[in-house]
Amino acid sequence: MNEWSDGVNRESDKMVSQSLVELLYDLPFDEELWSLQGRQIGRSGKELLAEVRRFFDLGLIREIGPIFNAAMLGYKTTLMAASVPEDRLEEVAGIVSGHEGVSHNYLRDHVVFNLWFTLAAAGGEESLVSAIDELSQKTGVPMRRFDTIRPYKISFRLSNEALPEPSVKNTAFDTLDAAMQKRLAAAIEILQQGLPLTEHPFETLLEKLNFQAPSLSKRFDVNVPSISSGGESGAMMTVKELLACGNTLKELGILRRFGVTWRHRKIGFIENMLCVWQIPEHQIEAFVERIKGIGVITHCYRRTRYSDWPWSIYTMIHGRTRGECETIISQLCQEFSEAKYLAMRTVKEFKKQRVVYRPMIFEK
């Protein structure tokens, strides 16, 4: 039995149209965001909000919040694989999932490396090595690290079509004054609380967190200055300032998007495969361009390879059935006849939860 398929609402994918997935993928930083988005599909803001609430109640939406570029926040990340005996799987998976730097942790059907997880550590390489050593000692199982050499595609959409990603203006961080840097640090913390499902969510979010403002300043060694108060220490951030910070974080490339994260299985994409590829060097560029044109392949990276592990291109493939995923792989093999691959199905999800980031780049 594939535990990945347990509890799937097989009718739910009929409720969620592709246009709605697109609409909620990257929400604008606007005080009237529901009305603004609703108009695009001929609905009022209240109607759209009611629909989103219904999706939450049905368990189709995991959360509405930020997806950050971890490296730009001062974090070092990697993909890890562990070889875990079957009789210790639950124990080891529990230890791994309990680490605050682990965001994803899955059982996959590989004969050697059956537990795959992502790991992030604040402070760079030394901190990451320390985290890996800690997990290795606690679990006592062999682990291997697969660092990103180059990210080719990071899309959190699930679509049968290729969809463009938001552009980044690449505003220079060092051109921002100290007051703005402090506001951005506070905004990163605030946005990670998630978006309340109210008519004016950013206002609700700040009202909810006002009592925490002093703790934000202490935690990050920064104050929460307000433009309207001349940047004085301890002043509350306004809604307009928070929205401006959100847009600035996007322009910097620190914030990839701010929007809905769906529960893939609940909206019909019950199959999930990590497919790793061995592609001749002269074909990699063309292969990657082809991958970018396939909407249900959400991620593509070039990663570390080893003498006993020749795969260097990593892709995440989603489908409504196992056959859909296998068809995509077959088509790619027909187009790239020299390609070799290894496909690993996701059998069980142990953890999928955003890492709570501290914005290291803004700390003193």
Image (cartoon, rainbow, N blue to C red):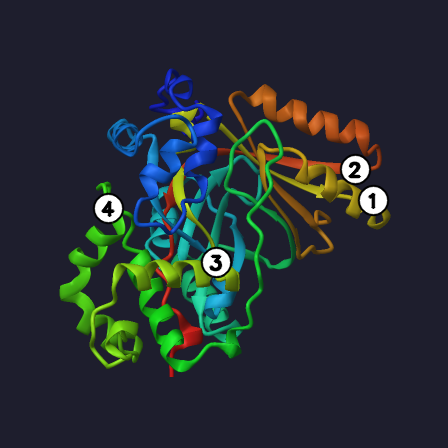
Q: In terms of sequence position, does the residue under pointer 2 or pointer 4 come before the other?
A: 4
Q: Which residue, as the protein is rendered here, is positioned at the far left?
A: 211
- Give the foreground label among 3 and 2: 3
Residue under label 4: 200
Left or right: 206, with 355 as reference point: left
Whether tag 2 and tag 4 are in contact, CB under 8 A, the answer is no
Q: How far is mark 4 from mark 3, CA to CA?
A: 21 Å
Q: Nearer the viewer, mark 4 or mark 3?
A: 4
Which residue is tagged 3?
250
Q: Type of residue at label 4?
A: His
Do callouts 4 and 1 mark residues in contact (Cβ within 8 Å)? no
Where the N terminus falls, by quadrant? top left
Q: Any mark on residue 339, and which?
A: 2
Which residue appears at 57% of the width and 57% of the height? Answer: 168
Secondary structure found at label 1 = helix
* Residue placed most toward the observer, 81 or 221: 221
Say which amino acid is labelled 3: Lys
Q: Quadrant of residue 356?
A: bottom left
